[in-house]
Amino acid sequence: MPRIHLVVSEPDRTRYAAAARREGLSLSAWLRAAAADRLDDRAGAEPFRTEDDVWRFFADRDAEMECGPEPDWEKHLDVIRGSRSRGAAGT
């Protein structure tokens, strides 16, 4: 298995080793898992190449949130107007 030499500060080494102990891992195994987690988090994080990519991104986020698309702008304005009128002094 190839070896990698990693230079870190003493405080970071202490933090990493403590985290590894808490998880029941060797420092080496913990660092490998941390690197794998970071790669997994960034997997598929491709830059937008087209306008369609941007729209697809936001559609996917809406689907994840299960809230659907945002209301029409006129509906937002109606809410704002209603809020303003409830706070008016009526004079």
Image: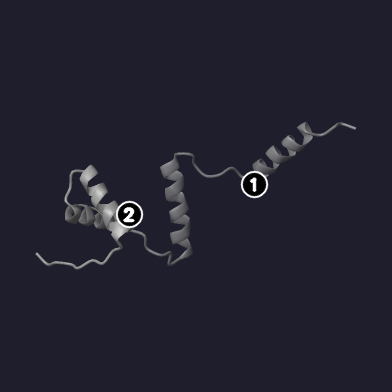
State whether residue 84 appears in this view: yes
- The amino acid type found where label 2 is placed reads Asp
Q: Secondary structure at mark 1?
A: helix
Q: Which x, y percent locates residue 19?
A: 26, 47
Q: Is residue 67 left or right of residue 18?
A: right
State whether residue 43 appears in this view: no
Q: Earlier in the sequence, mark 1 or mark 2?
A: 2
**Residue lying at 31% horizontally and 57% vertically, measured from the top left:** 12
**Residue lying at 43% horizontally and 64% vertically, measured from the top left:** 48
Q: Is residue 81 left or right of residue 60?
A: right
**Residue lying at 52% horizontally and 44% vertically, measured from the top left:** 69
**Residue lying at 76% horizontally and 37% vertically, measured from the top left:** 84
Pointers 1 and 2 in contact (CB under 8 A)?
no
Alpha-carbon neighbours of circle 2 within 10 Å: few (<14), some, or many (≥20)?
few
Q: Is residue 31 above or below residue 23?
A: below
| Tag of residue 41 | 2
Q: Which x, y percent locates residue 71?
A: 59, 42
Q: Secondary structure at mark 2?
A: helix
Q: To which residue does mark 1 refer?
A: 73
Q: Which x, y percent locates residue 30?
A: 21, 52
